[in-house]
Amino acid sequence: MKPLLALICSLVTTAALAQTPAGAWKTVDDSTGKEKAVIRITEANGVLTGKIEKLLDPAKQDSKCDECTDDRKGKPVLGLTIMRNVKKGETYWEGGDILDAANGKVYRVRLSLSADNRKLDVRGYFGNPLFGRTQTWTRME
């Protein structure tokens, strides 16, 4: 019985440790409620990066980040890196920033993964995390 219990504990621990925001996520437009884009989050050396992999509005396929004020200014939105330098903290993935390509604003970011690994709360904020907004992204794979 002890080996079975040890195996179950090991599988639960492994599953909990395997939870990561890495993967493809579908976003929804805050104002219209329509599906907007697919964001691909990758992890390298414990750092997360997110890029716009697909725009779901056919009319926006050639759009550029004209409102951006940093190195992303004028770059195509499709393929644009919108999340950078996010690392695992004790409770959240945080410490990096996220770009709102619609208005060019860059916010600090905090990510919170649901227990079932299917939803990702993405909180963009200035200064204190209490002052910001949260979007819930849905895992695609």
Image (tube, rainbow, N blue to C red):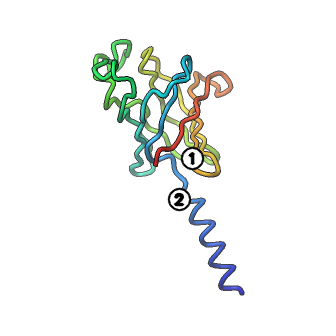
Q: Secondary structure at mark 1?
A: loop
In the figure, residue 15 lies in which quadrant?
bottom right
Viewed as shown, does residue 63 lie left or right of 140? left
Question: Which amino acid lies under the numbered mark 2 shown in the image of this protein?
Answer: Ala
Task: Name the secondary structure under disc 2.
Answer: helix
- Which x, y percent locates residue 85? 44, 38
Q: Considering the image in quadrants, where does the N terminus appear?
A: bottom right
Residue 74 lies in quadrant = top left
Q: Position of residue 72 (x, y in %)?
A: 32, 22
The residue pinned by badge 1 equals: 118
Write the residue at 34% across / 19% down: 60
Q: Nearer the viewer, residue 26 or 59?
A: 59
Specify the amino acid type for callout 1: Arg
Q: How many discs appear?
A: 2
> Local crowd at mark 1 within 10 Å, few (<14), some, or many (≥20)?
some
Q: Most extreme residue toward the right, as rendered?
A: 1
Spatial distance from mark 1 to mark 2, Cα to Cα?
A: 13 Å
Which of disc 2 and disc 1 is earlier in sequence?
A: 2
Image check: 130 left or right of 136? Answer: right
Q: Work out whether 68 lies above or below 130.
A: above
Tag of residue 18: 2
Residue 31: image location, x then y, percent: 56, 17
- Which-is-in-front pick, marks 1 and 2? 1
Residue nearest the observer in this picture, 30 or 90: 30
- Give me the residue at 37% from left, 16% from top: 68
